[in-house]
Image: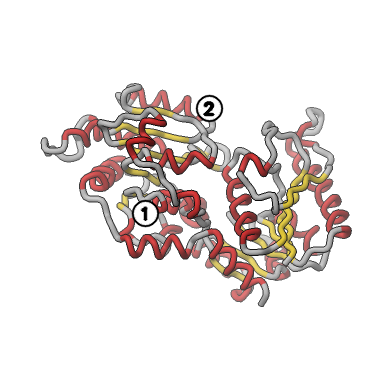
Amino acid sequence: MRITFISQARFPTEKAHGHQIAEVCAALTANGHAVTVLSPDIRNALKESAHGYYGLSGKLGVEKLRVFDALSKWWVPGNFAFSFTMRSYGKALKKWLAEHPTDLLYTRSPRLLKSLLQTDIPVVLELHTLPRRSRLFIRRCNACRLVVCLTEPMRTHLISWGVEESQVIVEGDGVNLQRFEKMPESASAKAEWKVPVDRPVIGYVGSLVTRGTMEKGVKELIEAVALLKVKIVGQERSCPTIFSAYLWIIGGPRDAISRYRRLAEKKGLTKEDIRFEGPVKSDRVPSALAACDVCVYPAPASKHAFFQRDTSPLKVFEYLAAGKPTVCADIPPLRGVIDPSLVHHCRPGDALSLAKAIREALTQPNTNEKLRRSLLQHVSWGKRMERIISHSKL
């Protein structure tokens, strides 16, 4: 099948959605489809090609369409720049699609639906959040061949708005198992990354904030490790190294790092207790995880839709693929996806609960190897995209 994936943002990008697009398209290509990624040719600080940045196969086509890049024009007001750029991109898309036959359009951008549906080519819409409710959005969803929601709460919400139940399936983010097939030994990974070998390394890998400024639980993670340091959690003398856990935070953006570094200092964590690595390329993530003794997926106590409805546990899948004891915030979108026997749950926003879960993961890690392997096979990118394409043919 000829599939055209249409991004509304620059590609490649340092943001997490670019990695997800790359994995989706790589899986489609590996499954035997002819795939082309389209993106607007707008200002991009990354000069490396998408193939080089993400390590993509040469079989995957990547094209940038010329647009009026209002986002780079100082004289275009910020609240109009995005709309002008998308309008220009919509016209460029129509022209390109008229000249390049394709069997299926795939996008995660509701903003582009108007232009795509006008082509009469079947459209698959993958939703990572829900826009403001409107009759127009509902009508456009029902005009798609298929709507993919990341979580069951998102699907329930969408159907309650009036989208046909038969139109909507749930497929969370996946995991690229090949990246974790040849994991380095823990000792060599620790040496490579220069993290302590005589202290348990508590790792967090991912963006420190989401949707611009929304915190993702890093604050609580810092507080939890500070609690471990002062021995508030547990009093056993038989495991003294637990109380000298080393926190390793990998990810950006840089301004968030500065803010969290100041918080760590206030909580009594020194350079001997915590390190902010900053962003690393995706091909180095497996070795970074190999250097960790416990990996953490924290969350704040928040009623925001991102934590109650939208977020998908990509990080947890990667932690489990690396074979690491995993601490995970107990939030609604992850329930029914991650079996409790595979992780150590903690209450979102509760640093003490998080500290206790980290301690438990260090001393009595959950092990359910059969279930872990079964889950990872099910959520591999290849299997995920097979199911989506199969549904899109209905």
Identify the residue at image location x=39%, y=60%. Answer: 338
Residue type at numbered disc 1: Asp
**Quadrant (top left/top right/bottom left/bottom right) for the C terminus:** bottom right
- Residue 211 sits in quarter: top right
Left or right: 142 with respect to 292?
right
- Residue 118, horizontal then vertical, whole percent: 82, 63
Which of the marked residues, 2 or 1, is nearer the chain's N terminus?
2
Q: Residue furthest left?
A: 237
Residue labelled with disc 2: 255
Task: Give x and y (percent) for residue 80.
Answer: 77, 40
What's the residue at 69%, 43% (across, down)?
A: 11
Q: Amino acid at mark 2?
A: Asp
Q: Few, some or many C-alpha atoms within 10 Å of disc 2 (few <14, some 14-19, many ≥20)? A: few
Image quarter hosting the N terminus: bottom right
Q: Is 289 placed left or right of 309 in the picture? A: left
Secondary structure under tag 2 reads helix
Q: Is residue 184 above or below residue 129?
A: above
Which numbered circle lies on residue 330? 1
Residue 327 in view here: no
The correct choice, above or below, for 391 with respect to 372 in the image is below
In front: 240, or 32? 32
Q: Position of residue 76 (x, y in %)?
A: 80, 33
Disc sitting over residue 155 in the figure: none
Q: Secondary structure at mark 1?
A: loop
User: Label 1 crowding class (10 Å Cα cut-off): few <14, some 14-19, many 20+?
Assistant: many
Residue 130: quadrant of the picture = bottom right
Residue in the picture at 75% in, 68% down: 122
Residue drawn at the location 66% of the way across and 64% of the way down: 32
Can residue 35 be spotted in the picture? yes
Rendering coords of residue 9 (x, y %): 70, 45
Quadrant of the rendered image containing residue 47: top right
